[in-house]
Image: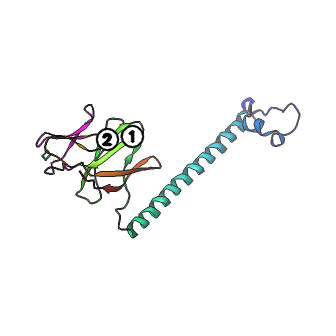
Amino acid sequence: MTEREHLSIAPDGQPHEAQPRWRQDFPIDWPQDHYVARRDFTKFMVLTSFAFAAGQFWIVAQNWLRERRGKPAMQAIAPLDKLSVGKSLTFDYPNPHDACIVIRTGEQRFAAFSQKCTHLSCAVVPQFEQRRFHCPCHNGAFDLETGNPLQGPPRRPLPRITLEIVNGTLYATGVEERAV
Ligand code: FES
């Protein structure tokens, strides 16, 4: 046994296993310290895996219910860390040619809409600084958070894509068609 692996005797002379919980969790010797680190890491991995499995199970159950109710399935868009504040991503939802756009408008705020302008279906582009989506075809604009028309020919808001976060990933969960 090297000096580093030397085991200290507790003040009461009892073995390590008989020591109070706090002393077991904060050992002063290297081998025991490594054991605690491994044990905590294993606990962390088990809990993380369980949370991930529970999240996946929940999504499968949700999609089964949605299918029964004739609603579109949940669809993963991106892990949250791929979308910093002010950044946007395009995706197709609920069908392969339904272009949509999501933007992170704040640390805990996201907004997603159909990317088709409600005037004549040109693709809108986000302008984060101006807090709007711009339509270059006829200079239309929509509010970045609500999708409501702000200027130009569009009279109807952009259809909103509802969102949910599961296990650190952003999911599209439905389309809200909205009246004027
Ligand atoms: S198509 Fe967007 S303003 Fe006309």
Q: Nearer the viewer, residue 121 or 19?
A: 121
Query: In the rendered image, which quarter is residue 93 located in?
Result: bottom left
Q: Secondary structure at mark 1?
A: strand
| Colour treatment of the image | rainbow
Judge left or right: residue 159 versus residue 64: left
Residue wearing tag 1: 109
Q: Residues within 10 Å of mark 2 (few under 14, many from 20)?
A: some
* Tag shown at residue 67: none
Does the beta carbon at disc 1 come under 8 Å from ligand 1?
no
* Tag shown at residue 145: 2
**Which amino acid does the dot numbered 2 rest on?**
Glu
Q: Residue sitting at 31 percent across and 37 percent down?
A: 87
Judge left or right: residue 146 versus residue 149: right
Q: Is residue 130 above or below residue 165?
A: above
Judge left or right: residue 33 versus residue 52: right
> Quick one: quadrant of the N terminus?
top right
Q: Residue furthest bottom?
A: 68
- The residue segment tinted magenta is 116-142
Q: Residues within 10 Å of mark 1 (few under 14, many from 20)?
A: few
Q: Residue sitting at 13 percent across and 39 percent down?
A: 139
Q: Residue furthest front?
A: 180
**Which amino acid does the dot numbered 1 rest on?**
Arg
Q: Residue sitting at 48 percent across and 58 percent down?
A: 56
Q: Is residue 86 above or below residue 57?
A: above
Cα gap from disc 2 to disc 1, whole angstroms: 9 Å
Q: Earlier in the sequence, mark 2 or mark 1?
A: 1
| Cβ–Cβ under 8 Å for marks 2 and 1 | yes
Q: Position of residue 168 (x, y in %)?
A: 45, 46
Say which of marks 2 and 1 sits in front: 2
Q: Main secondary structure of the magenta part?
A: loop
In magenta segment, residue 110: no
